Amino acid sequence: MTAVQAARRIVVVGGGPAGVFAAIEAKRTDPTAHVVLISDEGCEPYEKPPLSKAVLTGKARPEHAPIAGPKGTAAHDVVLERATLVTALDRAAREVIAADGKRFRYDAVVLTTGSLVRELAQLPLGMARVHYLRTEADARALAAALGGCNRLVVVGGGLIGLETAASATELGIRVTVLEVAPRILGRVCDEETGAFIAAEHRRRGVDLRTATAIVGVRNTADAVEIETSAGAILTAEAVVVGTGVEPNDELAAAAGLTTDRGIVVDEHCRTSDPAIFAAGDAVRFPTPRGLIRLENWRHAQDQGAVAGRNAAGANEVYRAIPSFWSEQYDLYIQGVGFPPLQPTRRIRRPLAGKSLLLFEIADEILVYAMGINAQRDLAAARRLIERRIPVDPAAIADSNRPLAALLKANA
């Protein structure tokens, strides 16, 4: 860039981890660029994982975990536009348009619009005593409700639902979890691991009901009554709905960008408009398995960083190794890699106490690992997966042989 050229204008839409990392990396890649991060919330962008855990139990507040660090986005020379809802993209004029009429001119845009809660018709958004957990305002409202709650019903046996159930149980609240599927965590882990986690919830006093649907809801003056498909009537002072999310791709679709149950991007995080990039929960991106969409913090951070650098002139390829983590009571649950549709081998490494470790191998390559309270092993497993190092099934099944030794042997 010569002295007479104008600084590159990069606009990032969305204040989650994908957006924050996109903005920071765009500025780092092109220090002369003018980078604007637009968030529809009125606060500094914050980490969302604590919302269903430490925030509900009163151990932390959202502002305690700013994504950009203790000094916020300003410390990275990123302009933060708070409480600003983006309603349209004018691709011809290269402008991002906000609800208040403000327009932001751009040379490149990064869309990190995230996801929207999947609403249940019987328990709609805005219904009294019914809570969906997505933002810090949601978490504050739920934490306040739990303060005067004796009985809580959680609808959905996924990670968010179970994290909320664990937090409420720690507060001394009687919790019932309703899951329509035959078991909890059906999209997250294998049946044996799911049973292990379910047993811990039941041991803690959670009434966990699987293969159970809601057939009726009645809101009384001081409680919600839920009728289940088993004919039971459950009464609770509060209900939390955790039945998943949908990609927030409406802005992209309205602008004429290619969408398919999410914003479609190429391996460089570029949309069908070469000036517009996208990252995070809202995005479907290419992998050896075809186009997929991921919903986890690590993916949002990593893809956001690549999208931001490419918006600033780089040409990086995003290669994802998916991962997730969840905290429930004293269980630290992690997974890394792509679970194969038909693994060649599934191997469990024996661990003591409340610990589990599962490996899935395809064609002698470790492709997926999941563990409970096995952080060190999972860190080594991630490196084995990333490097596609052939593994000996007997070696990874032997708890006396550190996984790190397999890395050193193939260094």
Image: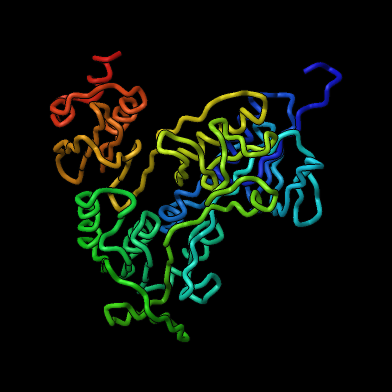
* Residue at 17% across, 36% down: 347
* Residue at 32% across, 63% down: 169
* Residue at 75% across, 32% down: 34
User: Could you say which is closer to the camera, residue 116 or residue 257?
Assistant: 257
x, y (%) of residue 309?
Answer: 61, 28
The quadrant in which residue 173 appears is: bottom left
User: For this view, does 149 lie left or right of residue 84?
Assistant: left
* Residue at 34% across, 52% down: 187
Location of residue 327 with respect to 299 vertically, above or below: below
x, y (%) of residue 308?
Answer: 62, 32
In the image, farthest residue toward the bottom: 221
User: For this view, does 308 lie left or right of residue 180?
Assistant: right
Q: Specify whether residue 63 is in view.
A: no
In the image, farthest residue toward the right: 4
User: Could you say which is closer to the camera, residue 84 or residue 313?
Assistant: 313
User: Could you say which is closer to the camera, residue 353 or residue 401?
Assistant: 401
User: Could you say which is closer to the camera, residue 69 or residue 335?
Assistant: 335
User: For this view, does 162 lie left or right of residue 99?
Assistant: left
x, y (%) of residue 124?
Answer: 51, 72
